[in-house]
Image (cartoon, helix red, strand yellow):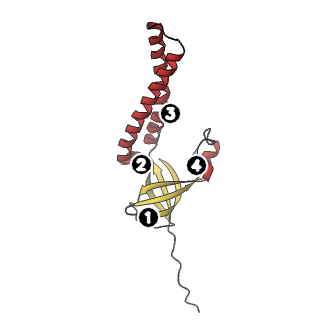
Amino acid sequence: MVTEEGIIEKISHSNAVVRIQRSSACAHCESRGACQVSEGNAMLIEVTNDLQAKVNDHVEISVPEGSLLKLSFLVYFVPILALIAGALGGSVLAQSFNLQPTLVPIVCGGFAMGIAFCVLKWVDRGAQARRNYQPRMTKILFSAKAPQPDGSR
């Protein structure tokens, strides 16, 4: 399980919005310059509030590693594979029909990658419905206490 700690910002119905600070793993990530997280130092994640946590509670959020690896593979590898396959197919098409040998592979590769992104969007909608691909609140680390009235007047 990949785990992060966060603070509940808002509760709505059976969900909670959790603010997660950028972890130390982000400092070593090659994509930190392009990541939205590095700009604001925090990200907001909506999770199901199965533990009945309250606003300002510190909680642990986790995602199964297998799910994370599978989705990472889909997001990073499938578009590249589609680009290469489309370019190779475009190259064969250009040779078969005596077309321009550079333009057709570029257009076909871009078209294939666009289709891959559309398929990934469709897969994303299905993954959002499955619980094993969603982050979960696994435990309340400590609860925020409500201010106590001062009775020592």
Residue labelled with disc 4: 37
Where is residue 132 drawn, in percent x and y? Answer: 38, 46
Identify which amino acid the numbered label 4 is placed on.
Val
Nearest the viewer among 147 and 15 is 15
Where 123 falls versus 37 (above or below)?
A: above
Residue 35 appears in which quarter of the rendering? top right
Separation of residues labelled 4 and 3 (CA atoms): 18 Å
Q: Give the SS element for disc 2.
A: loop
- Callout 1, which amino acid? Ile
Q: In screen coordinates, is 8 left or right of 126?
A: right
**Residue for badge 1:** 11
For the residues labelled 4 and 1, the Cα–Cα distance comes to 22 Å
- Residue 112, above or below 144: above
Earlier in the chain: of badge 4 and badge 1, it is: 1
Image location of residue 28, percent across then percent down? 64, 42
Which residue is identified by label 3? 76
Q: Amino acid at mark 3?
A: Tyr
Looking at the image, do the residues carrying marks 3 and 1 touch, with CB atoms under 8 Å apart? no
Mark 1 secondary-structure assignment: strand
17 in relation to 37, above or below: below
Q: Total marks drawn?
A: 4
